[in-house]
Image: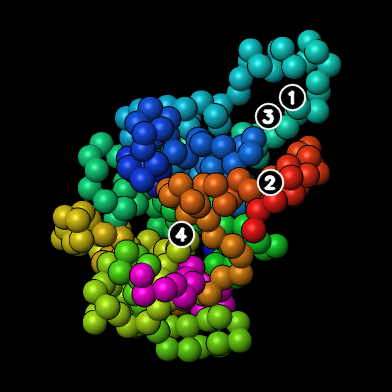
Amino acid sequence: MKKITKAVIPAAGLGTRMLPIARTVPKEVLPIVDRPVIEYLVQEAVDSGITDILIITNRGKGAIEDYFDFSPEYEAALLAKGREDTYNEIRELPQKVNVQFIRQKEPKGLGHAVNCARAFVGNEPFVVLYGDDVIMGDVPCCRQLINTYEKYKKSVAGVKAVSDELIVKYCSLGVTALDEALGEYDIYDMIEKPSLDQKMSNFSILGRVLLTPEIFDILDNTPPGAGNEIQLTDAMGTLCKSYGMTALDFKGKRYDMGSKLGFLTANIDVALQHPEVSEDFKKYLKSLNLN
């Protein structure tokens, strides 16, 4: 079995839930303490064995490209001040992975964005990390999906059980158990943004999928769905019926970085563990006398 080395990160969304800041600052470069959201996604992929990443952007998101380039002015200033550790730190990630970029020229949905990666992916399985979703845990979520793919030889969706309130905003999966103790299920159907009477289960895809290249021909023939966009969920629904697909109830905490609450929660959780600010931040929180 060929090693999975490619990942795709769709980051072309307008970020309307993060307005007004998203009007001029891509939500993917908003900071979680001192690192942009997009770095957490790229680092997860690298820690999972990925060597090549395609980030799909659109107009106004050049800051993402700049972040993964070298910064001669910063680097020269750091070296002049004797800050070799910081210099090495900001060069480390761009040296570890080949990051490429392509623009989604029209906002036609997540399925259309993923289809833009066909030439990059070729005839290989690949991981998709949704640009809004940061997942933190002991084992990188992408690595968990790769392990499951190697076990069942099928595409894999990273899933969690969500409330009825959220299931109608996300998607619902029809599943049968493979190994409930390990959180592994066979997917027989899925629906994007269902009404509650269409719900098949409370399992929903949250931010990570591993796809085989058959998805591209399916996407070519997938009509617009919810929101008049080409929905990746619709294409995966065809994929699971034609080629099979596995669901993995992954280990880790997911943060919805397209929402204000998700952004704030991620910053608090990371700040509480950050070596530079954690102690002072804890003192500050205690001083608020929150109930």
Q: How far apart are marks 1 and 2 (CA)?
A: 36 Å
262 within the magenta span: no
* Quarter holding residue 11: top left
Q: Circles 1 and 3: CB distance less than 8 Å?
A: yes
Q: Distance between the residues labelled 2 and 3?
A: 38 Å
User: Which dot marks residue 91?
Assistant: 3
Residue 41 lies left or right of residue 176; in this view the side is right
Q: Which residue is under mark 1?
A: 87
Residue 193 lies left or right of residue 164; in this view the side is left
Mark sitting earlier along the chain (2/4): 4
SS at badge 4: strand
Q: Distance between the residues labelled 1 and 3?
A: 6 Å
Q: Which residue is under mark 2?
A: 288
Q: Circles 2 and 4: CB distance less than 8 Å?
A: no
SS at badge 2: loop
Q: What residue type is labelled 3?
A: Arg
Quadrant containing the N terminus in the rendered view: bottom right
In the foreground, 154 or 20 = 20
Vertical comparison of 15 with 212: above or below:
above
Give the total of numbered labels. Answer: 4
